[in-house]
Image: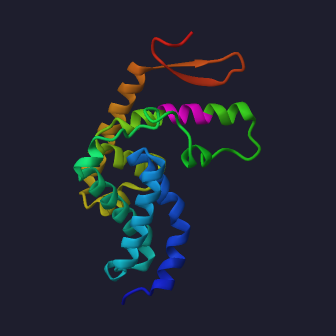
Amino acid sequence: MTITAPELANQLAPQRARIYRYILGIVRDVAEAEDLTQETLLRAYAKRSTLDDPARVASWLYRIATNVAYDRFRQAAYRHRPRSLAQEGGASGPDNAEIAVDPGPRLDKMMEQREMSACVQDYIAALPESHRAVILLHDVQGLTNPEIAEMLDLSLATVKIRLHRARNKLRAALESGCSFESDERGVRTCEPRGTAT
């Protein structure tokens, strides 16, 4: 049974922001993430007949988003564009506005989370595409290994291996490239090695 367009629209609406953040984590460009999110939703509408179980719309949509993002990477012109917000003039845009924080946080805590998030995101962006997708889906989006395996059409063992390797690479990069310190207010910051004062 094919899901109708209005039924699909009702199920996709709550997923849009999560799909946007996921794609932004892959492409690291705000405008590109918006375009690819729209492309993901358009493909979802066009391919709604391939949705076997409407209860699994989220994993189906993430798989489409992953394919859309990787299709863009395969285009030769896109490979030569910078994919880091830091390379494009700093970390700004919706990804920083949507950081989850406790209700009623202090401003310094919010700033700490944003600074740490931007630092870690730069290192995640440097991971190979296959590792980046798995770590974003698991550690940022909170999906389970079986959900990721289904979404990316991988075996569960492959997902576990890629997640383990991605975390090890990220940990090594952070340890070699960052200096974590507490400022005078007790706020933890991440500074590139060699520039901390």
In the rendered picture of this protein, how many numbered marks are placed on residues? 0
Residue name at image x 27 percent, y 44 percent = 79
| Image coords of residue 44 (percent x, y) | 39, 73
Asked which quadrant contains residue 13, the reply is: bottom right
* SS assignment for the magenta stretch, majority: helix
For the residue pair 170 and 32, the one nearer the viewer reads as 32
Range covered by the magenta-colored residues: 113-119
Position of residue 135 in the picture relative to residue 191 (left or right): left
Q: Is 19 situated above or below 1?
A: above
For the residue pair 14 and 43, the one nearer the viewer reads as 43
- Check if residue 194 falls in the magenta segment: no
Q: Is 30 situated above or below 9?
A: above
Residue name at image x 62 percent, y 46 percent = 97
- Check if residue 115 falls in the magenta segment: yes
Position of residue 74 in the picture relative to residue 64 (left or right): left
Which residue occupies the extreme front position in the image? 77
Picture quarter with the C terminus: top right
* Res. 172 in view: yes
| Image coords of residue 85 (percent x, y) | 46, 38
| Image coords of residue 21 (percent x, y) | 49, 52
For the residue pair 44 and 138, the one nearer the viewer reads as 44
Q: Is 19 situated above or below 92?
A: below
Picture quarter with the N terminus: bottom left
| Image coords of residue 45 (percent x, y) | 40, 77
* Res. 130 in view: no
Residue name at image x 33 percent, y 83 percent = 49
Asked which quadrant contains residue 182, the reply is: top right
The color scheme shown is rainbow
Residue name at image x 37 percent, y 26 percent = 173
